[in-house]
Every structure is written in C-alpha cells, then in structure tokens.
Image: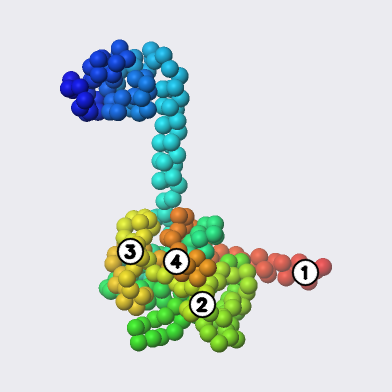
Amino acid sequence: MSASGTSPLRGEAVSVSELGGGETCFFTPPCVRCAHTSLPLKGRVPESYYDDSPTTEIKMKNTRLIALFVLVAGATNAFSFGFSDIQYWLGSGAKQAGVVIQWDTADSPQALAWGVRYDGALTGENLFDIVLNDPRLYAYQDSFSFGRGIYGIGYDTNNSGVTGNGYTNSGATPDDALANDPTDKWKVGWFSNGFWSLWSTNGANATGFSSASTGVSGYSVSNNDWMLLAFAPASNGWSTNPPTNIAAAAPVPEPASLALLGLGVLALLRRKRRA
Ligand SMILES: [Ca+2]
C-alpha cells in the first residue's frame, strides 16, 4: 500500500482513500474506472475487474488497445524478406550475401533482391559485379581514384531484352544518360539528379539497414550481409529511406524451361506457316 501522494507501482493495490472513488485500482496512473485516463492491462487484474465494470469505456478502450496491438504486430510482420525468399542466386560457396536495389521508394514493391553465394573475401564492388550477371540488370559506371562510381542502374522490367549497354548518354554529364527502353527501371545521378546511396545490414532478413560510410569499393562483405543500393533523388534533398518492402528478382529460366520455351516458339512458327 502506497503512502498518500506517492505513485504506486504498477500492479500494486492502491488504497480506497487514495483514489477517492471507493474502489481499488491496480495501475499507475489509475485507470479509467477510477475516473483517470490510463487503461488497465488485462492479465494484471482479476477477470472480474472487467466483467463487473460499470463502464463500456473500459471495454471499448480495451478493444482499441487490442486493435492497435494487432496493427503494430501487423506492421512488424508485413515486411519480412530474408535469404529464404531470394529466388535469383548467383555464384557458389559456403557464404552468402544479398544485394537489394531500390530505384524509387514509390515503386511497389520498392526494391528487388538477388543472392550471391561465395567463398573468400568480397568487396561491395565484387558483389555488385556478380549480380550484374543477371542479363536484365545493367549499370553505368566509372572508375575513380577512390574506386567504383555508380552513375546509373537499370533493370529490364518487361524482360524485352537489354539493348546495347541498356542506356545511352548523348549529354554532357552522367546525369544525362537515358535508358534505351523507357519502360525499364532506370535511375541515374551524379551531379544533379541525385546519387546511388549505399546501405547495409546483416542477418537472416533484409531489415535494419544503416547507411554505409564507404562506397562499393571500400565495402567489405561479411557472411549474411545485405548490401542495399538505393537511389537518393535530388528532388528529395539527396536523401532516401531503405525499402519497406522487397521482392525477389525473377530468376532466369532454367535450361529445361528454355527448351520448353523454344518448343513453344517452334510450335507457334509451324502454326504461322500453316496459316
Ligand atoms: Ca525492357
């Protein structure tokens, strides 16, 4: 029992006189039943406390609390992308790393992810080069004294095939480069458009990214690392946020499905000839 004027601990019974309502409250600050604002946490008070409650307010608040809890839990569970979700793997080895690329936070999903299996040591530059073996992915890059500079990254969204380098620059600065297919995912920036920011995290899931303090060349990859390249547009103050949802990059068809695809095309050609 607390002395008058001292806040009781949660779960500690408060004397009737302290509340002045003729009842016992178990909470700090006292709950709505005691004409205060705090909501009792179910499980910390006898069930009868709820059952004989004279107020619907408690029950309503309780429902709201549960709804809020479900919402928060849902928000936490809504974004879960891990190594087990990756469909496009490159390389081989005992270690693994994920590469996540985010062109635009307005995209849905916001980013695509690839997996790399490797042994030995890799830099972020090596990791990116391995992922660039995906024929749908292309990049506009340059070498500097500090290492690799990434101007632009593109992705053949509609799988129409990448023409040439995937981009053409007829302008004066890297920022002027355009994707050869305007429907591709494409972001380029160096001086004026924005820049490709580098982030990383480590673990089973691609969450909790923090901004890397290096470029891709200075980044040492650890087992279970996730390297995120996220375009930070000048229109957003040269900043961006890590993705809140990620999709697995589509794997290239297996040789078997390629053969089937070939047969399908062959059948189509035959049909055309007959027509
Ligand atoms: Ca395309």
For the residues labelled 2 and 1, the Cα–Cα distance comes to 50 Å
Q: Is residue 181 visible?
A: yes
For the residues labelled 1 and 4, the Cα–Cα distance comes to 52 Å
Mark 3 or 1, nearer chain start: 3
Q: Is residue 152 left or right of residue 30?
A: right
Q: Which residue is mark 3?
A: 225
Q: Which residue is mark 2?
A: 192
On whether ligand 1 comes within 8 Å of the CB at mark 1, the answer is no
- Is label 1 or label 4 in front? 4
Mark 2 or 3, nearer chain start: 2
Q: Which residue is mark 4?
A: 239
For the residues labelled 3 and 1, the Cα–Cα distance comes to 50 Å
How packed is label 3: few (under 14 Cα within 10 Å), some, or many (20 or more)?
A: many
Mark 3 element type: strand
Find out whether the residues at labels 4 and 2 contact each other: C-beta distance under 8 Å: no
Mark 2 element type: loop
Mark 3 or 4, nearer chain start: 3
